[in-house]
Image (cartoon, rainbow, N blue to C red):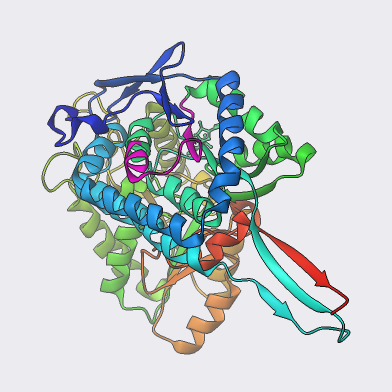
Amino acid sequence: PLAQLADPSLLKTDALINGQWVPGSSRFAVHDPATGAHLADVANLGPQEAEQAIAAANAAWPAWRAKTAKERSTLLRKWYDLLMQHQDDLARIMTAEQGKPLAEAKGEVAYGASFVEWFAEEAKRVNGETLPQFDNNRRLLVLKQPIGVCAAITPWNFPLAMITRKVAPALAAGCPVVIKPAELTPLTALAAMELAQRAGIPAGVLNMLCADATNSIAIGKVLCESSVVRHISFTGSTEVGRILMAQSAPTVKKMSLELGGNAPFIVFDDADIDSAVEGAFASKYRNAGQTCVCTNRFYVQEGVYDEFVAKFAARVATAKVGNGFEDGVNQGPLIEEAALQKVQRHVDDAIAKGGQVLVGGKRLNDLGSGQFFEPTVIAHASADMLCAREETFGPFAPVFKFATEKEAVDAANATEFGLASYFYSRDVGRIFRVGEALEYGMVGINVGILATEHVPFGGVKQSGLGREGSHHGMDDYVEIKYLCLGDI
Ligand code: ADP
């Protein structure tokens, strides 16, 4: 698939430090999850190169922060334009290494680029404050200044958007960045770096360290332990988030963490069921269930339970699974074998504990060597099942039955996670009650998809710290400074 790029020079396999492409002393392989085909060998860097990248970023910082907000904005805007001009090629690279259907990949390029556009605009609005004086001989001011060298560690499920959502506000605020993209999807990330170079982002302001799984851990340690790096932004598992927090404690780093979710999706008796079915389908099966905001648990009130599960199962049965490059495919492969085995474990556990399979339930073996799993719906789910507690991160929908509003809210909140949640209701009182009672950073009401660049994305509890996107998305990349001016 990569032979058909309109601009083959977007296919980069070396890392980027201080404006130079760095081949590294060894390489690691990247594969297509739909076919198992080998796509490329990418530079495998280690701690020494991580130190070099941090030093390059630190050296580039004074000139970058000294640019006017408008100058930084113009460069970001150029990067945005280039990302959109190369939307088709970026999507091809993404589908090849990540597996999501090509239409979804194009959507992610637009979504990822939108953060660059948004923060190009926000760069000009990092406003300070003047405060009322407590003494007429003084004047009190608040400045917002760039925090310093930032590090970003990103996952494979959104190979572009998880980078731009962190990097764009950092650059806009006047901070240089060192990025460590996921080892499974470095090619989209490197193509984005090539476009940033073409846009004129200066050397050292944007650096990318590629590494295999082992070296990623070593590089992560260097980034956390460095006293030059002032901020770590991470999207990935809660488990790794905790490790990064612990490693960052000695240097008291500011952290933005977007970690696991266990999203509930509640359908009340008064809901529009057809709309709920469409929302459920979109929320569950996007990216084959591999997003941190994908629904993990469906709770349906007893009066509409049978109708909802019948319609939902029928809708899911229409989904076409296959290689993301094929026309009409709604669901691609899972990213790797371990991901598929986790889904199978959750499905088998649900069946063993009394779940009723309405559609799917097993691996699809007739689609070649990729990791394909049938879109699955299981009714009569119960709280003792693994899927009630753990994030499945795959195309499996367990449907639980409930009687009262309180029961649904309690079950939805009975988790250490708190990222996205969803519910369907037409009752305005209930909408406010439940919307306020759900312990989640984001609540979709009568919608199954809620992310966009100008809203605050993030979680509570062990789903993370900080918000990405929106005007709040700049907060983590600036420090607030108070100036007290006397002798006026
Ligand atoms: P996922 O569950 O999405 O695979 P992970 O949390 O394992 O997420 O990985 C997300 C990112 O974190 C990847 O870029 C991966 O290389 C990186 N990573 C994994 N473990 C560590 C670690 N101990 N230190 C630093 N980075 C890590």
* Residue at 74% in and 73% down: 141
* Residue at 76% in and 39% down: 251
On screen, residue 228 versus residue 400, left or right, reads: right
In this view, which residue lies farthest toward the top? 25
Q: Is residue 285 visible?
A: no
Q: Nearer the viewer, residue 342 or 256?
A: 256
Q: Nearer the viewer, residue 148 or 347?
A: 148
| Residue 373 position in % (x across, y down) | 29, 37
Quarter of image, res 327: top left
| Residue 289 position in % (x across, y down) | 36, 47
- In which quadrant is the C terminus drawn? bottom right
On screen, residue 208 versus residue 80, left or right, reads: right
Q: What segment carries the magenta color?
A: 194-210
* Residue at 74% in and 63% down: 481
On screen, residue 309 versus residue 455, left or right, reads: left
Q: Nearer the viewer, residue 138 or 406?
A: 138
In this view, which residue lies farthest toward the front? 488
* Residue at 53% in and 45% down: 390
Q: Is residue 241 visible?
A: yes
| Residue 58 position in % (x across, y down) | 61, 37
